[in-house]
Image (cartoon, helix red, strand yellow):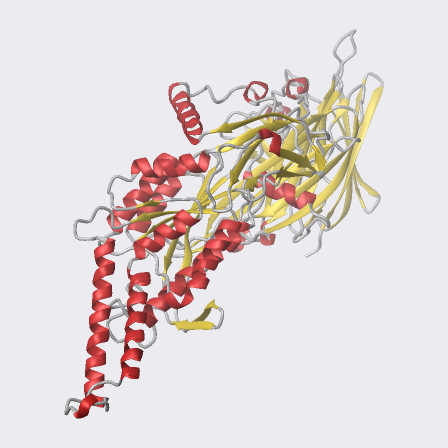
Amino acid sequence: MRVLFVLSATLLVAQQSNPDANVVFQSQTREVLLEVVVRDAHGKLVTKLDPSQVSVYEDGVRQDIKSFRLVPGREVRAEVEREIALAATKPDALHLDAAQARPPSNPLRTVNVVCLILNDITKETRPFAFDAARKFVDKELRPDTFIGVFSLDITGLRPVFPFSNNRANLMKAIELASQNQLAKLNPDTAAMLNGLSISTLGAPLASSGAITTTVAPGVSVATSPGAGVPGRVDGASAQDPLGTRGDMEDATIRGLFEIDALKTLVKQLSELPFQKTVLLMSTGLTRPPDQLEYWDSLIKLAVNGGITFYGLDVNGLDPFYNPIETAAAGVQGVGAMSQGQSGVGLSAGGKYAPGGSSTIGPSPAEQLMQSMKQTDFLAFAVLSTNKQEALREIAESTGGFIIANTNNTEALLTKVMEDVDTHYELAYRPATTSADGHFRKIEVKLAQPGLRVQTRNGYFAVPETGEGPLTTGDFGALLALDAKPRPHAFDFGAKAFRFRSGKGVSQYSIAFEVPIANLTATAEENVKKHRYHAYLLALVKNAQGEIVDRVSRDVPSEVGDDYLPGLRSDKMIYEHAVNLSPGHYTVETAVVDQEGNRASTNVFQIESREQPGPDVSDVMLVRGVHTLDRPADASDPFEVPGKRAQPFVSTTLPAGALPYIYFVVYPVYPEEGQQAATLRTQFLKSGRVLATQQSVLPQPDSSGAIPMALQPIAYPGDYEVRITVELAGRSVERSLQYRIAAK
């Protein structure tokens, strides 16, 4: 067997940094800062709460509250504007050292979930509605606010754009929606800030066929795509389902669809512990007069779920639109219709002629019945025609308000977010300070009856580790690691490769290897692409079970359909270096398939030991050494100037694989003078020595490292490579066993 030293020392000499420079000093959570929103039984904000009536529990243990104050929404807005101004004038101000940027507390900010719903938008109201939506997103988006855009019509409630905190993406989505150009998008299955997700709120109708939806107990309605309400022959359509308005049956059906869709939304939002707001931009809602209990159940469900509605009448300040006059006209029209119908019917079929008169008229009983029928029509008209009043009712009954009869919406939309941002802020020092990554359940209780609390239901005990604060992806992965039993929806590999040691620490590279075929590919219509999205997380815990480091990576990608078959046979690989002192460590890893809403977990161990004398890293398989078109990352042991090695996590490779053997030598020279280090390499197949080669190692780089790569032949079989480094009478040996599969 011939062993090829395909990469010379000049190609693999790296500018390795001092591992001590990357040592992470852990700090315990000294204080929890919790935001709390309190509302009364009618959904109204409570802003005068006695602190003595508030108690907070963590994992069932009452905590000592250190501070408690009301934070008005205008204060939050001012702080956000200050941060924006600071970022604009000092671009580097937000890129401080971790120790400077992170506060000593663990702030559990209230997440604001805002559902922006465009309902019954007509050609005339479209410009006003979308202009208001753009202004709201552009000026009112907060760092902890997630906005989802939905549409509501006779076909139901459909997601237009997933919940997002990205202003540019939301603005683009609204712009496209205003032009009816928005492609269908799946809701984001990434968790909200504490890991909870909201599922698809309805789905677009199928391309053909009828769909039957139960909209109220005992009421079922069948609708077909592109068609109006069954039985209508007056020009009804999906855009204008009622055609000529005023018919009780059709208006009732429409109202039931709206109520049912909103109840679906409310039920799903109710499960979230966040500030939940629905901004309904609409021409109004219909309250079916014979289904008022169902309407009231929607309001009750929203209040109990802590969901506040705000209404915006998209008719704006239309000089030709007056909701009261419109309702009155509807009443008069229905009254005239009912009178006309009764007159025609009675003249044709009446039999009662008082006093022997030749004029045939209704009997007293028939007159009473007709009067009752007319009263029903009038009641229907009052309740269903004034759609603005229904919008007002659902808003004011859940703690919000309506924006109507005005074109100047900016100040009132600002008031919406000031309401949303208003909260109490309390701080406590947790009785349990172990940073083990587990979920800590929080419960806030009030002594005063009839009040409802909205706050986070807990937090993950993760110290200030990693490259930044926790993200939404981290929370989803932490949920998987905290689950019992832990999920394993698909296979992936995870391993730690040991590199340099010195001055009390050793450098390890935590590596992930995820088969692409195990991830969900979501087709993007009309663009001939598929979307993948994986999130990787590793928690490194010491022997006491506390987190000492965190590795995370968000990996979204889009792949052209032409490349999809080849990609599915490939693997996603990511590695990141950490520095560990001697001791035993447990590494808990999770991979979340965001597109498939699935997760898998793995656990492995690290025994970190000091190794005096000449040191050699672990021996590993790599796919090859590729050209690096940027400066090498000195903290990444797989990178050298101009080159980068990509490791295999698995030691069983498919047939046809052409791996390299990669390792790094760290010689320690005696004080009396620098000596040459020697390298002996042995290759064995099925336990039999195939080849032995010995050579003198080149000089190390300025950091004292000598990266090396070897390329053996790769026929199917079981192999072992043994690396021995000798220097000044001392030797260190490393070995690796691997397999090349047969075809």
Give the left or right position of residue 132, taking residue 645 as reference: left
Q: Is residue 403 above or below residue 77?
A: below
- Outermost top residue: 672
Percent coordinates x, y for residue 21 in the rendering? 64, 18
For the question of whether residue 675 can be seen, the reply is: yes
Q: Quadrant of residue 418?
A: top left
Residue at left offset 37%, top offset 65%:
288
Percent coordinates x, y for residue 671 in the rendering? 78, 8
Residue at left offset 63%, top offset 45%:
591
Q: Is residue 584 above or below residue 555?
A: above
- Outermost left residue: 358
Q: Is residue 714 above or below residue 581?
A: below
Q: Quadrant of residue 337?
A: bottom left
**Front-lying residue, 320 or 341:** 341
Q: Disc count in the image?
A: 0
Give the left or right position of residue 69, taking residue 727 as reference: left
For the question of whether residue 6 can be seen, the reply is: no
Give the left or right position of residue 476, taking residue 400 as reference: right
Percent coordinates x, y for residue 284 in the rendering? 32, 55
**Front-lying residue, 262 or 323:** 323
> Split into 4 quadrants, where in the image is the C terminus?
bottom right
Give the left or right position of residue 137, taking residue 676 as reference: left
**Front-lying residue, 237 or 701:** 237
Percent coordinates x, y for residue 598 in the rendering? 60, 52
> Split into 4 quadrants, where in the image is the N terminus?
top right
Q: Is residue 693 above or below residue 405?
A: above
